[in-house]
Image (cartoon, rainbow, N blue to C red):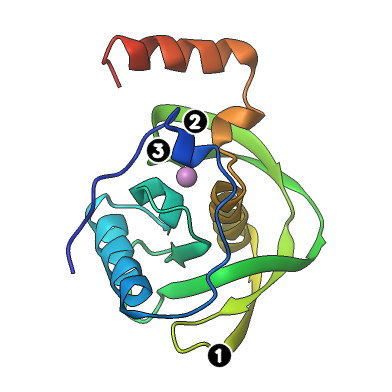
């Protein structure tokens, strides 16, 4: 396993809807391991496969960014099946460097998906963890925090990106 380069906005892979994972083969397992390494190295609290250039529905989440053992969640084909409440807070994204955006998210969610052994898993998440899941699942649907930002903020980012400043 090894960290992979993180793709930054506006690369098209970040705007596409990622494909369902239909079989768990060695490529998927390696991808998950590499994503974990990439997330911990950054460091970050979540990463979605499109952020390493793979348009597949796979996310890794760890609200402690690797500081506490046993907190890693790897989920394939995650779906939010229930949500309630709402809370606005600022978010950052490894694929949108140096930008923070206020995003309104559900406060509690129930996420269902699959683990690397193909077993169905569900996670009830609240607050910060719920926010991370929603952020990562957005990535699978081709959405990034800039989609919640003002057009001015988006334009400024793209300008800096064009100049190679971010
Ligand atoms: Ni992100």
User: Which residue extends farthest left?
Assistant: 2
On the image, numbered disc 3 is attached to which residue?
Answer: 95
Above or below: residue 97 compared with residue 51: above
From mark 1 to mark 3, how far is it between C-alphas? Answer: 30 Å
- Marks 2/3 in contact by CB < 8 Å: the verdict is no
Q: Is residue 66 visible?
A: no
Tell me if 66 is positioned left or right of 149 in this view: left
The dot on residue 12 is: none
Above or below: residue 130 compared with residue 150: below
On the image, numbered disc 1 is attached to which residue?
Answer: 119
Tell me if 98 is positioned left or right of 150 in this view: left
- Asked whether 84 or 27 is in front, the reply is 27
| Disc on the earlier residue, 1 or 3 | 3
- Asked whether 64 or 48 is in front, the reply is 48
**Secondary element at image label 3:** loop
- Which residue does the image show at 82% across and 56% down from the upper left? 85
- Asked whether 91 or 155 is in front, the reply is 155
- Which residue does the image show at 44% across and 17% down from the upper left? 157
Specify the quadrant of the image occupied by residue 26.
Answer: bottom left
**Secondary element at image label 2:** strand
Q: For mark 3, does the 10 Å Cα neighbourhood hold few (<14), some (14 to 19), or many (20 or more) residues? A: many
User: Which circle, 2 or 3, is nearer the viewer?
Assistant: 3
Disc 3 residue: CB within 8 Å of ligand 1: yes
**Secondary element at image label 1:** loop
Q: For mark 2, does the 10 Å Cα neighbourhood hold few (<14), some (14 to 19), or many (20 or more) residues? A: some
- Marks 1/3 in contact by CB < 8 Å: the verdict is no
On the image, numbered disc 2 is attached to which residue?
Answer: 100
Q: For mark 1, does the 10 Å Cα neighbourhood hold few (<14), some (14 to 19), or many (20 or more) residues? A: few
């Amino acid at each position: 396993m090894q960290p992979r380069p993180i793709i930054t906005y506006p690369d098209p892979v970040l705007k596409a809807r990622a494909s369902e994972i239909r079989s768990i083969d060695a490529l998927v397992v390696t991808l998950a391991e590499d994503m974990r390494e990439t997330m911990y190295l950054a460091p970050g609290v979540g990463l979605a496969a499109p952020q390493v250039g793979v348009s597949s529905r796979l996310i890794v989440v760890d609200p402690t960014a690797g500081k506490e053992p046993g907190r890693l969640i790897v989920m394939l084909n995650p779906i939010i099946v229930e949500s309630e409440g709402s809370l606005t807070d600022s978010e950052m994204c490894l694929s949108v460097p140096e930008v923070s955006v206020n995003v309104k998210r559900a406060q509690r969610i129930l996420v269902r998906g699959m683990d690397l052994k193909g077993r169905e898993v569900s996670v009830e998440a609240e607050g910060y963890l719920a926010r991370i899941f929603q952020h990562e699942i957005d990535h699978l649907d081709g959405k990034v925090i800039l989609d919640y930002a003002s057009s001015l903020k988006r334009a400024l980012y793209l300008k800096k990106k064009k100049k190679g400043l971010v």
